[in-house]
Amino acid sequence: MVINFTNFQITSFDKSNPAHLSFLKSLIKDKTILERFQGFSQHLLHNFGDEFFDRGFFIIYNATIVGYLDIGNFNQIDSCVYLRCAIHKDFRGQNIGKSILNEITHYIFYTYPYIESIRLKIAQDNIPSLKIAQACGYQWLNDDYYGKYNPNHQNIKK
């Protein structure tokens, strides 16, 4: 599955793609990512079918893999979806994370109007990610969670 956005694209993991394998290995070697994104590799490998939710994607920016985006299952009780995003250390500080969060938020809210909110889990010591979330309109909910409500929410059953 590949989805194109204005400034980037997300693509499902392809085990036959050498660039995907190489980037996965680099993520696994990053201790910060391993600590903050437990279970990401299993989620990334769970890319079957055409379902948008409950899967991991690589983020492609200027024809280069720069990060990982995890889109959680749609939570029907809270009408929300959870996101996790990790930008490779070589690409941090370039506003890529902010661009991605803005565009993926817009995409989810307009493509899936039954989703009431998007939630992000961000550790309180992850200051750069907290600043990005706040700059994109996300607000602190509780503990390590930030959320943004869909201005176009329609109370539609999925």
Image (tube, helix red, strand yellow):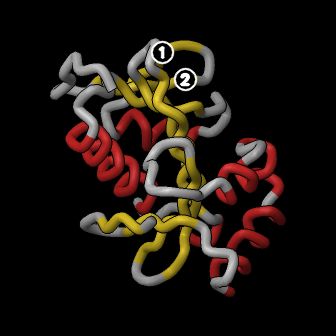
Percent x, y of residue 77: 46, 13
Number of numbered tags placed on the structure image? 2
Q: In this view, does 94 lie to the left or right of 112?
A: right
For the residues labelled 2 and 1, say whether their Cβ atoms are less than 8 Å apart: yes
Q: Residue at x 71, y 45 (%)?
A: 37
Per the image, the residue denoted by label 2 is 145
Q: Residue at x 44, y 56 (%)?
A: 50
* In front of the other: 125 or 117: 117
Percent x, y of residue 93: 50, 61
Residue 56 visible in the picture: yes
Q: Is residue 102 left or right of residue 120?
A: left
Percent x, y of residue 158: 33, 26
Residue 128 visible in the picture: no
Q: What residue type is labelled 1?
A: Leu
Which image quarter: residue 17?
A: bottom right
Which residue reaches farthest front?
49
Inter-mark Cα distance, 2 to 1: 6 Å
- 112, above or below 42, in the image: above
Mark carried by residue 80:
none
Q: Which amino acid does label 2 sit on?
A: Tyr
Per the image, the residue denoted by label 1 is 141
Percent x, y of residue 53: 48, 43
